[in-house]
Image (cartoon, rainbow, N blue to C red):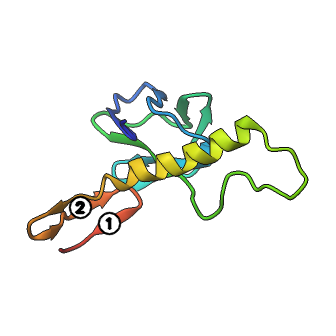
Amino acid sequence: MATEVSYTGDGSDKTFDITFSFLKNADVKVELGGNLQTNPTHYSISGTVVTFVTAPVNNQVIKIYRDTIITAAEHDYSAGSSVKAKSLNENQLQALYAIEEAKLVTTTSGGITTGSKNDVTVNSD
């Protein structure tokens, strides 16, 4: 499954579709011309649409990607509490999305390929 999408600015369009699944808006990252943008300073997310405050200039590359937060489970369970299917499914999706994103880091016979892998940058192998 794709975990990112790229667009090219035209100086007037401010809205761009998020074409992949995600759990929380905080899991979606936006780069403009290679620079990470911040929500809500530079853009906002409503549903599956990113809306920039200012339209990206002509030929500026917009990269929207998922970087699932995995520092803690989406949901915690306590003894004696009910376990809801929605919570179980979201925890499973959190793990699945993180595994999908890890696939962006590829190896060659010489080691790991260089370049940006969303939240990981490989400088040399």
View extreme (right): residue: 80
Q: Which quadrant: the N terminus?
A: top left
Question: Which residue position holds label 1?
Answer: 121
Q: Nearer the viewer, residue 115 or 3?
A: 3
* Residue at 64% across, 39% down: 89
Tell me the amino acid under the disc marked 1.
Thr
Is 30 positioned to the left or the right of 9 in the image? right
Q: Position of residue 113 (x, y in %)?
A: 18, 63
Q: Which residue lies furthest to the left in this view?
A: 109
Q: Which of marks 1 and 2 is nearer the N terminus?
A: 2
Q: Of helix, strand and loop, which one carries label 1? A: strand
SS at mark 2? strand
Q: In which quarter of the image is residue 123?
A: bottom left
Residue type (three-letter) at the residue carrying disc 2: Gly
**Can residue 40 be seen?**
no
Is residue 117 among what the camera can see?
Answer: yes
Foreground of the two, 13 or 78: 78
User: Do callouts 1 and 2 mark residues in contact (Cβ within 8 Å)?
Assistant: yes
Quadrant position of residue 85: top right
Above or below, 1 relative to 117: above
Residue linked to disc 2: 115
The vertical placement of 116 against 12, above or below, is below
Considering depth in this image, is 24 or 37 the residue closer to the camera?
24
* Mark 1 to mark 2 CA distance (whole Å): 6 Å
> x, y (%) of residue 4?
38, 40
